[in-house]
Image: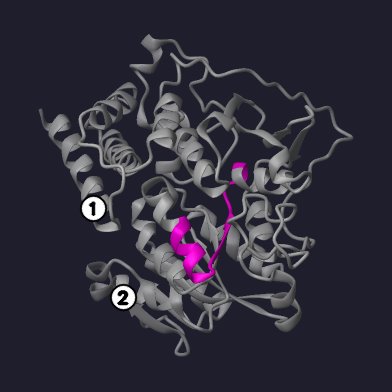
Amino acid sequence: MACPRHRHSCHKCAPNGRIGSKDFLSDAMQKTVLNVAILGSTGSIGKSALEVIAASEGKLRVAALTAHGQLDLAIDQARTHQARWLVATDTVAAESHDWSALPADTELLLGEDGLRRVAMADEVDKVVAAIVGSAGLVGTWAALEAGKTVALANKETLVVAGSLAMSLADRTGATILPVDSEHSAVFQALAAGQRDELQRVILTASGGPFRDYTSEQLSEVTVQQALSHPNWSMGPKITIDSATMMNKALEIVEARWLFDLAPEQIDVVLHRQSIVHSLVEFVDGSIIAQLSPPDMKLPIQYALTYPERRRGPAPRLDLTQYQHLEFQPPDPERFPALDLGLRVARDGGSAGAVLNGANEAAVAGFLNGEMRFHEIVPICKSVLDHHQYDSQPSLEQLLEYDGWAREEVSRWVCA
């Protein structure tokens, strides 16, 4: 793999040997404006990405937007940012929607075919993969097939199909740059040393709103309580995942594939303030951390402008003010999801698709009032325990495992 800064094979600037297969400096010099497709523009990541692009002083430009719901907001976004394409992925909702306010120079596309088209378009330089859940796999996969630079916020792509996705990126020359704040922090910190000097990565977790709850209190958690994250503003699914710590379990799996790590090289610590986003420890004992306020604009901007750093709209950390940073090991009994993440990182194969599918169905069941909060992780473990493991499934088989896991949760809910 060509190192993006030194143009030879090394691990100094492309820390995992797999991220960054293009010559970024050459691309940046040849092109002064980069066209960006935002898959999932009406979600929290998509909105932040639009803020980053608007503040880029013309160096980034919106080429395409996609939305499943909130179609009026998507139309407003297309008008404000002069998008060439707008994709409505919910074809049923799109057919009955009033599109008269859509700008005449914005082309409307529908469904997964439209999603694939903009993700693979020659005019698109970078793709922000921000569709939540396994639904984001379609657009991300198309971008990887086209050899695009993908700013990956959709961790489920690597949870479900990490081995296949990284192999595809290797074959097509696609580049995957992390947007999750934890993985962006690891990516930045890894630049402080050589790959063979790496000891471990340490992902931080706020612990969510229930980090101090007893088992009895957890059994009474309401949807409204679970949607109130103490530090971050996120969509409902990710917020629930944070409360169960399943988000951290999925991030363990994502880190395993993204940085080509052994599961034993990945640790998690609780950090209530969400200021230190992750740490990297090297063999000499040095620990490098990345710090910033809990806001997604910084990791989004870094993925869109890498290897350059530019001024942007992200809030700054004011170290002239009193700061209290705490770290503590997570209690495995309080947060059993972490063991599931490590297990899936070790097992690979079909395990990730099953865990992710079960979790998405269980979270939907909780949000719909069909199960209790404290039941989400146990049902995911049960489904994972009882599936027929396959060490080398195809993409089609992984999607079948995903569907099977969802059906199993549905049967459990209806029982």
Q: Residue furthest left?
A: 415
Q: Which residue is mark 1?
A: 397
- In this rendering, position of residue 291 left or right of residue 171: right
Location of the N terminus by quadrant is bottom right
The numbered disc on residue 18 is: none
Distance of label 1 from label 2 (alpha carbons): 21 Å
Q: Residues within 10 Å of mark 1 (few under 14, many from 20)?
A: some
- Which residue lies at the image location 89% right of the left edge and 35% below the top edge? 320
View extreme (bottom): residue = 104
Residue 113 marker: 2
User: How many discs appear?
Assistant: 2
Is residue 402 shown above or below 247?
below
Q: Which residues are magenta?
A: 166-182
* Pointer 2 local density, CA inside 10 Å: few below 14, some 14–19, many at least 20: some
Secondary structure found at label 2: helix
Can residue 266 be seen by looking at this rendering?
Answer: no
Residue type at mark 2: give it: Asp
Task: Look at the picture and state if 96 lies above or below 297.
Answer: below
For numbered disc 1, what is the local secondary structure?
helix
Residue 368, located in which quarter of the rendered image?
A: top left
